[in-house]
Image (cartoon, helix red, strand yellow):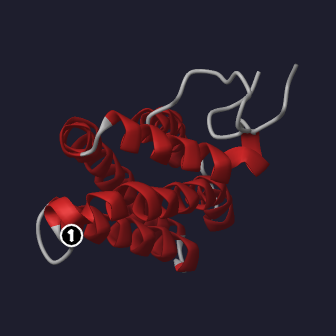
Amino acid sequence: MNFPGTCTPGQVCGTDMLITDALLGEHAVFHLMLGSIEQSLPALDSLSNLQNRIAAFAFALESHAGLEDELLFNALEPHFGTQSGPLAVMRMEHDQITDLLGNIHSASDLDSARAFAKQMIQVTRGHFQKEEQILFRMARQFLSEEELSALGAEWAKQRTPLVGLDMP
């Protein structure tokens, strides 16, 4: 089995994955991670425990946001521009989430880190909701199936070192 985007010309490949489906799949994992972080917040008894609990999420989210911006947002720029509108809002929220994660990392006490974490969870969930209910639908409206599929193949290609195994 080949992952989308890992096929060479002439190979029989699996079903093409749209970029919006790939990003939705990543969102599903992030929703689970956010729920787990949120549940654990009251029991975390030290600043370092809280920061360590968030670190893997922050790393994965940074990678996700980078691909989302590079692939989907850039493809939508000709339709929406960059100075205002949905892409400007999405990028501003990416920056806000990054800032909150940085605040958690650099917090000097557990209470402030916990407050930043709660705010980060709220902002991230709201951001995902906008992407899932509005932006991804707009992408399907303004980009062709072929464009979405090509972007999905590029997503898979960039994710291949992490998940793309050439399995029989």
For mark 1, does the 10 Å Cα neighbourhood hold few (<14), some (14 to 19), or many (20 or more) residues? Answer: some
Read off the residue under disc 1. 88
Tell me: residue 138, above or below residue 62. Answer: above
Residue 124: percent from left, percent from top: 35, 52
**Looking at this rendering, what residue extends furthest in the left direction?**
85
Judging depth in this view, the residue of 84 and 18 nearest the camera is 18
Q: Which of the two residues, 149 or 124, is positioned nearer the viewer here? A: 149
* Residue located 47% across and 47% down the image: 151
Q: Residue at x 21, y 74 (%)?
A: 82
Q: Is residue 52 left or right of residue 82?
A: right
Where is residue 29 drawn, in percent x and y? 53, 35
- Residue furthest to the right: 168
In the depicted structure, whether residue 81 falls above or below residue 63: below
Say which residue appears at 62% left-offset and 60% top-offset: 59
* SS of the residue under disc 1: helix
Inspect this view and state whether residue 65 appears: yes
What is the x, y in percent for residue 71?
44, 57
Where the N terminus falls, by quadrant? top right
Q: Is residue 34 visible?
A: no
Q: Residue furthest front?
A: 10
Give the side of residue 151 with respect to residue 45, left or right: left
- In this picture, residue 21 sits left or right of residue 139: right
Number of numbered discs: 1
| Residue type, numbered disc 1 | Ala
Above/below status of 75 relative to 153 = below
Q: Quadrant of the C terminus?
A: top right
Q: In the figure, 168 relative to 23: above or below? A: above
Report x, y in % for residue 36.
54, 37
Please report the residue visible at 43 percent of the width from the left and 32 percent of the height from the top.
Answer: 21
